[in-house]
Image (cartoon, rainbow, N blue to C red):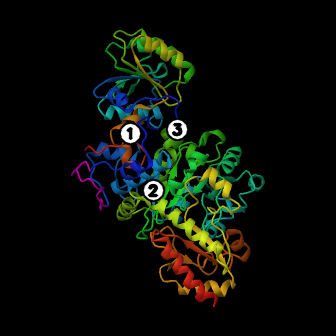
Amino acid sequence: MSDSPSYGFDTLQIHAGSRPDPATGARQTPIYQTTAYVFRDADHAAALFNLQEVGYIYSRLTNPTVAVLQERIATLEGGVGAVGCSSGHAAQIMALFPLMRPGDNIIASTRLYGGTVTQFSQTIKRFGWSATFVDFDDAAAIEAAADENTKAIFCESICNPGGYVTDLASIATVANKLDVPLIVDNTSATPYLCRPFDHGAHLVVHSTTKYLTGNGTVTGGVVVDSGNFDWTKAGKHPSLIEPEPAYHGLKFHETFGPMAFTFHGIAIGLRDLGMTMSPNTAFQTLLGMETLSLRMERHVENAMKVAAWLEKDPRVDYVTYAGLPSSPYADRVKKHYPKGAGALFTFAVKGGYEACVKLVDNVEIFSHVANLGDTRSLIIHSASTTHRQLTPEQQEAAGAAPNVVRLSIGIEDADDLIKDLDQALAAATS
Amino acid sequence: MSRFSYSDEMLTRLLKVPQTIACVGLSINPIRPSYYVARYLQLKGFRIIPVNPAYAGKEVLGETVLASLAEITTPVDIVDIFRRSEFAGAVVDEALEMRPMPRTIWMQIGVIDEAAALRAEAKGLTVVMDRCPKIEYQRLFGELRMGGFATGIISSKL
């Protein structure tokens, strides 16, 4: 949207969105802990409520601290705008909400975070929506699974629990052919390792809880719009092109052009679903994002060292890290994820389920938690926790079989992480 | 993404208030984008002169709608074109007949006529195509920041 000079990632992760506070000159973004905002006069209030002017009305919709985070993430992703949400799961519903009506469906990758599989296979049915899960290495299968009620395609870039990276460009080609947007969950990659819009994706969602915040303090999410999907071309998404009764018949696409999806997210999504990000959450995430590139470099470097060590260990069956030269996705990583394959992967322990549980019980530096993207290294047995709601077939497809443990590699000393795994593996396989 | 590039410095200069903007193709229907844009610019301190033969003589935004640019008797700074690309050239030529001539021709998002732009530039006018002055004003003067949009503006100044 802008023709201004372009800046490097490291500059943008600190400065995008956050000019000095206009009221006080505060250099760090203040936490605007307020519910409501005073209108200049009745005309101003009316213009805001009619969406004729952008401004602050009520913090369910917009908040100055959250707005800084939205602009920063939108900028780093190369999008036109972003909407902050209360969690990554909220962001997924907020991304689908403008696209879907009862009876509509999405095509989703089989390789997704277990919570997303459950949200898509079970919970969204209550809205009258459904999802078909397909192997995203098979573009033809995606096309074959689509019908006239298909309204979006959904996948992760670098996948959780790990070992797989999606060829986004080929999936985007299918999306364009079907005239539906490709939504990419870019949580595990972050815009530092992958910018899905550069590969043709149309919308990005994040759990900002993870690498963007980086230190496991707050839960949040965001929906980013590339502004590149032409809602009028096939006309499959009436919420964005048809008159909106709640705004006197305003048509979002016609009125806001490439910003339509983001305006809809605020004016309809946050207004009526209320899954709003809090200002304190936005503040914590802004602090984290200032060091995103530095942390991601170390996360990737450590993941490579730990994965390479595990791969050579006789107590380990296999390691799924896509960054390893032995990975079936090594070429894809080189081509589409040149800065690395993230820091999330699984490995299979000889001794199966029992050994996995013992391993998790014996680590001292790794923390046994259901989270990822923390500065701390984390470990979890996905089959008995994050992917527990899935069937054995779904667990297998997601890379969360009973004999595998998932690691989220932190930014500690890699040697200490290796020592910790070494002693825990000894205890688990003795 | 538009293929036309204009610097923020230039757009900021072009959108200084107060100026008079002739909005060609302005609708009197309050939910049409052209009405939205004109009303917004008027709120920001621009004087709006509505031009649309379909509504000539009617009142909109407190101004009388004129049938053509030729009917305008006061100096105009910007001619903002809300017509499809194929009709934009004729509007530009009409603008070049105005005395004094406007300083800027602005064509809305999706409105592009490069030949007409060259004709206007040859007469010393500044031309912006495929852009909305409301969006640019909101982006450059801080308003879009409030909605979480990527403004592209990086500054350590107040």
* Circle count: 3
Between tags 3 and 1, which lies in front?
Answer: 1
Indicate left or right for A176 with B6 as reference.
Answer: right
Chain for numbered disc 3: A
Give x and y (percent) for residue A87.
48, 65
As drawn, B54 above or below A301: above
| Kind of residue at disc 2 | Ser
Please tell me whether mark 3 sits on a helix, a strand or a loop.
Answer: helix
Task: Please report the residue visible at 39 percent of the width from the left and 16 percent of the height from the top.
Answer: B125
* Disc 2: which residue: A293
Give x and y (percent) for residue B106.
43, 24
Tag 2 and tag 1, C-beta contact below 8 Å: no
* Label drawn at residue B139: 1
Local crowd size for mark 2, using a 10 Å CA cut-off: few (<14), some (14–19), many (≥20): some
* Closest to the observer, A366 or A307: A307
Mark 3–mark 1 Cα distance, whole angstroms, equals 18 Å
Chain for numbered disc 2: A
Say whether disc 3 or disc 2 marks the residue closer to the N-terminus. 3
* Closest to the observer, A141 or A229: A141
| Kind of residue at disc 3 | Glu
Indicate left or right for B16 with A234 as reference.
Answer: left
| Kind of residue at disc 1 | Arg
Chain for numbered disc 1: B
From the image, give the main secondary structure of the stretch colored magenta.
loop
* Closest to the observer, A324 or A370: A324
Range shown magenta = A21-34
Both labels 2 and 1 in a single chain: no
* Closest to the observer, B112 or A308: A308
Task: Please report the residue visible at 55 percent of the width from the left and 23 percent of the height from the top.
Answer: B85
As drawn, A27 above or below B19: below
* Disc 3: which residue: A254
